[in-house]
Amino acid sequence: MDVLEHTAQPKRERAGRGARREQRSHGPRGLGRPYIVRNIPTYDILGEESLIRIEETADRILAEIGIEFRDDPVALDHWRRAGAMVDGVLVRFEPGMLREILRSAPASFIQHARNPARSVEIGGKSVVFSPAYGSPFVMDLDKGRRYGTIEDFRNFVKLAQASPWLHHSGGTICEPVDVPVNKRHLDMVYSHIKYSDRAFMGSVTAESRAEDSIDMARLVFGRDFVDQNCVILGNVNVNSPLVWDATMTAALRAYARANQAAVIVPFILGGAMGPVTNAGAIAQAHAETMAGCALTQLERKGAPVIYGNFLSSMSLRSGSPTFGTPEPAIGSMVVGQLARRLNLPLRCSGNFTTSKLPDAHAMNEGTMSMLAAVHCGANFILHSAGFLDGLLSMSYEKFVMDADFCGALHTYLDGVTIDDNQLALDAFREVGPGSHFFGSQHTLANYETAFWDSEMADNEPFEKWEAAGSVDAATRANGKWKKMLAEYEAPPLDEGIDEALKDFIARRKASMDDAWY
Amino acid sequence: MDVLEHTAQPKRERAGRGARREQRSHGPRGLGRPYIVRNIPTYDILGEESLIRIEETADRILAEIGIEFRDDPVALDHWRRAGAMVDGVLVRFEPGMLREILRSAPASFIQHARNPARSVEIGGKSVVFSPAYGSPFVMDLDKGRRYGTIEDFRNFVKLAQASPWLHHSGGTICEPVDVPVNKRHLDMVYSHIKYSDRAFMGSVTAESRAEDSIDMARLVFGRDFVDQNCVILGNVNVNSPLVWDATMTAALRAYARANQAAVIVPFILGGAMGPVTNAGAIAQAHAETMAGCALTQLERKGAPVIYGNFLSSMSLRSGSPTFGTPEPAIGSMVVGQLARRLNLPLRCSGNFTTSKLPDAHAMNEGTMSMLAAVHCGANFILHSAGFLDGLLSMSYEKFVMDADFCGALHTYLDGVTIDDNQLALDAFREVGPGSHFFGSQHTLANYETAFWDSEMADNEPFEKWEAAGSVDAATRANGKWKKMLAEYEAPPLDEGIDEALKDFIARRKASMDDAWY
């Protein structure tokens, strides 16, 4: 297959004149990059001693309390052979044992896209933005909130594909509830392959669905290639606190067995699935995530795996979960430090909020949450675009707002370049005190790529904005996603592969009755 | 005066049971603190070598190009006596000279409030949130945008006073355009003293107005106290690039002469008043700010002074200034490092945006901008609440949204506490795998202060939110500021002081004709 003939190489920024010319011909800075290579350090908020205390607490949770692995005898067998203490479904671990097992996991790997120019590195200094995942509902300003359908699903795949600031097609962008539960994964994976040429995620809701997803990837990339390279991710959740159920462990083992990357994510709402105190929730998350990551290595040593992070809090007034609040933001920074001490790629959550509209509340929480993911060193940022309504709804308007913010973050993560051109001493000599820089040589040579210029912001003077109808951000976003869908162009897909996928889906569907739950 | 009998001591968090009891009785964490003492490190993005290159560029700008000090012979005389090269109005400085002069400025100082429990520390690990400053217009959802009046000014002083999450009353919160230009400062300073018991800022638009502001502070705090303690700030702007005009230098000297703190702020829109490249704009800002800060020390050695930061960018499509974009956010982090290397307190700008409404655009940019100020180590964050419309309008709704976010930042800046209670090992022992933490001992002991609970966010389930009228964030904010104004209670003010202030204002106004520009 020609899509496999060369391995994707990110276009990293080059210093000097050549790089500037390249940027200019591509428009805003960062456009066309398959992912970001961060040029600012991570924001490390805790010192060594505090990190060790959290790690020790995680070790004591693992050794003294343990984690249940329910209904998965293969997982229990793995643990037994690795030397863990297995008592029924409860598994306990000697301090340091999981860290030792995790030494075989790669610190960084490439997830290949069917368009090799869009393959992404996950690990190290890379940052990959992926759409939100898992909402049963969708929303837009015209039709309000309703259950998601396969048409919505395809729309979001198309919007992600059409956005220059996302790097990944995501997974279950919304639940297509008009397709039977047991057949959905086939249509979702097909949509990712058909309507996007970016990397994507497969199903985890049953071992067979994980295997179907991987089989479909094999039809695209070839069986041998898939055995040696990561082409699909599977996002599995801990049943926090301290329980891994068989659906998830079977799925993560299926991905690992195929040398594909499982993303191991605790799901802790403090006060419910974990303690109300942040340090305790972080220690728990660390214990649960290490156990899941280590299980992938027991299934297949050296398989890629991603250390995932999900912390949240509760409203004490309403008892509702909250998102985009300060505790998980700060917690993410600590989790990032813990993941780096294990030398594992890190997944964080992006734009979270409880708002039911793409309003000020939504972007206040979303921006705080997204910046925490960016600062903490996350390599794979799931939920980068679209979420509203406490993760229950994908919003068309919020999706394009968030994608635009992902664009701003390209510039942000470039940091500050320190060289003679950027320091601009000649410009000061040319302009001098009291003049302006508009027409200076230095400005003319640099202005085209100088500043991030949001497509969604309205920077016009008030009078001009008012004369144009006083349009708010949500209404602009409403026009934007419609324009993007109208102008969407499908990436070319080899006809033979397309046929093979359709045939596979038809055969698999024919073997199943419809199941709606 | 009894307000001066004790010096304010911030209620810092104490570890252990006593602190938790104290917090509980005060409601959400951080409530009642006069300012924040940060418990997370600053976010330092550049290494030593890069910082030195910026400092060297600033030194070369100062030595080779120089700064003009226009129409202020006293300032030129200061520079001459300090050993600078003065050629007409152009002043050039040997490398390192300004840094040497700045060694006499305090790294930290207390700005006293008339209520000593509300005095603030400015410097070190302190973070002080102050309202936005300088808009000619005000806005609300009911009446739209119009010129500000003294009634609006008083309203914003009252809203700041009523907000538990701001620490300072600010300065020119909006321009009261219904008061003659030459008399405004008297009514503004009076409003701060009368309707707030927090620390505040005085006028800088003429030397006499600066002196009037300080004289009014003397009526409150006593002449001798003011000579030895900071009770008022004056925010002065460089006429970037590389020009200080006499209005500003005379004002900054007036504040310094009275031992009050000038805030020295460049005003650089990249591509206009500075280069389009971030590193160059930062070097310029550093040069301009150092010169202004040093001038305060020549006027009065040891006077408090605040190193200010203001960077912004331009839209390349419209030519309009932009705010809340990634370049200034990243630039702030670098400026913070430079200020700390001078051992000076740092001022940054908070919630900036070009949006003309309190919408998603406003809070996306505002949140990014505010978090940059918090991360970069700013001690005094001007413009923490209220700005819309590219700094031209104070919004009532945005003010209360921003103030609520300031509340979230109290929790954020507390970071993660690592102790046995927070690590919660006993809670895991109690709950075990697969259960929940709702009713656990540990939850009951900690839940009341566990999580930030925004007053402005709606965390309810969708159905409940919809049944309550599907209210968006801006509409909630509209109700909130009206409620705050309706419930506002003026802090007590000594009648003798009040009379003295009124008498001073009447005499000063009687000595002036009305001037409207």
Image (spheres, coloured by chain):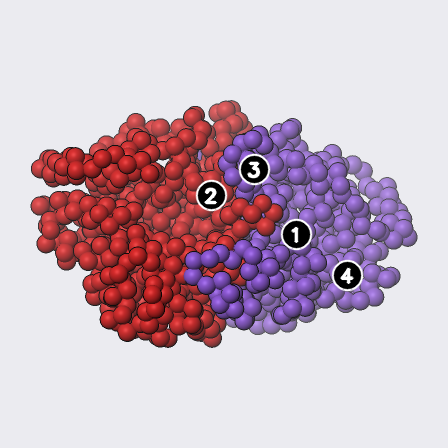
Chain colours: A purple, B red
Q: Nearer the viewer, mark 1 or mark 2?
A: 2
Q: Amino acid at mark 2?
A: Gly
- Residue assigned mark 3: A473
| Residue A277 visible somewhere in the drawing | no
Mark 4 → mark 1, Cα distance in angstroms:
16 Å
Within-10-Å neighbours for mark 2: few <14, some 14–19, many 20+: many
Residue A116 circle label: 4
Q: Amino acid at mark 3?
A: Ala
Question: Mark 4 falls within which chain?
Answer: A
Q: Earlier in the sequence, mark 4 or mark 1?
A: 4
- The answer to which of B100 and A161 lies nearer the viewer is B100
Within-10-Å neighbours for mark 4: few <14, some 14–19, many 20+: many
Percent across and percent down for residue A329 are 47, 52
Residue B390 circle label: 2
Question: Mark 2 falls within which chain?
Answer: B
Mark 2 → mark 3, Cα distance in angstroms:
15 Å
Percent across and percent down for residue B4 are 12, 49
Percent across and percent down for residue B419 are 35, 60
Q: Are discs 1 and 2 located on one and the same chain?
A: no
